[in-house]
Amino acid sequence: MKTFDGLMERMEDLPSLPSTVMTILDVLNNPESSANELSEALRHDQSLASRVLRLVNSAYYGFPRKIDTLQKAVTILGYSSIQNIILVTKIFEVVRSGSKEHSLNPKRFWRHSLGCGVTAQIIGTKLGLRKGEEVFLAGLLHDIGKVIFDAFLHEEYSKVIEMSREKNILLYEAEEQILGATHADLGYWLAEEWSLPLNITAAIAHHHGPAQAGDQMLIASLVHIGDILVRALEIGYGGDDFIQPLSRKSWGTLHLTPKFFEDIIPEIETRLEKAKAFIPENS
């Protein structure tokens, strides 16, 4: 991966995740912590606490009765789901703190990302793989480097998008030429800084080349194929009009078939509609 000294100097306004969030993540990563401890940690950040309660009562989870306390929410959802809610909420706040101008259309961009997360999760579930919440988060955040570039190096990133269109090249090729690093490189760096789980970090770093993800190739492959499928289905917009080459190794590893994809398309649309609750308003 790249060194980011030069880029970071030009992105000096990029904020870190708040200390309250890091404390909550420490509780989540402690195998001996309890639901009560996590609930107490969440109460120190009222915006997060409210967001957890709104999401647990949304159509995405579809519980028949209203859940009105944090402890109930934590117990019912589990740590992985709570981690997703926390990270997504705070990462959106980081993005909103950057430039108010956008080269990427925010609504279309996040619909693409959400579609990737939903699709990767569906594929994984159909194949009998566990850790569906982590697969969803990896897909949702796979292009986080793009939106951070756009928010904190807006003028340069607008040139990246212009070059991609004019030269008919993939966005990450234009990023490499203009910025000296790709959105996957920056996404990896951010995931490390934010202490995201290893498998999510690897999927973000290697969603264009999952064979390079080593032990984490499986989740990287799910995100890679999810990304390609939502582009083919024109769900949202990832910043360019190209579909990257499919990794044959990923295809072979997952033992997928064209019929498999035909069968899951209706479910993608249904799940995507419910998953919109994950995207904060005004994003």
Image: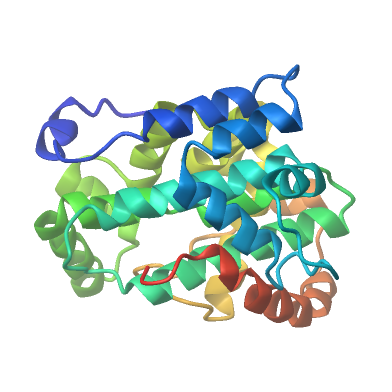
The colour scheme used to paint the residues is rainbow
- Residue 62 drawn above or below residue 143: below
> For this rendering, which residue is in front, 114 or 78?
78
Measured as percent of width and height from the top left, residue 99 is found at 16, 58
In the displayed structure image, the side of residue 115 where residue 281 appears, left or right: left
Residue 62 occupies which quadrant of the picture? bottom right
Work out whether residue 247 can be spotted. no
Measured as percent of width and height from the top left, residue 122 is found at 76, 62
Measured as percent of width and height from the top left, residue 249 is found at 69, 46
Residue sitting at x 15%, y 40%? 13
Residue sitting at x 69%, y 59%? 56
Residue sitting at x 36%, y 38%? 185
Measured as percent of width and height from the top left, residue 229 is found at 62, 70
In the displayed structure image, the side of residue 244 where residue 105 appears, left or right: left
Work out whether residue 61 can be spotted. yes
**Is the C terminus in the top left, top right, bottom left or bottom right quadrant?**
bottom left
In the displayed structure image, the side of residue 109 where residue 56 appears, left or right: right
- Residue 66 drawn above or below residue 131: below
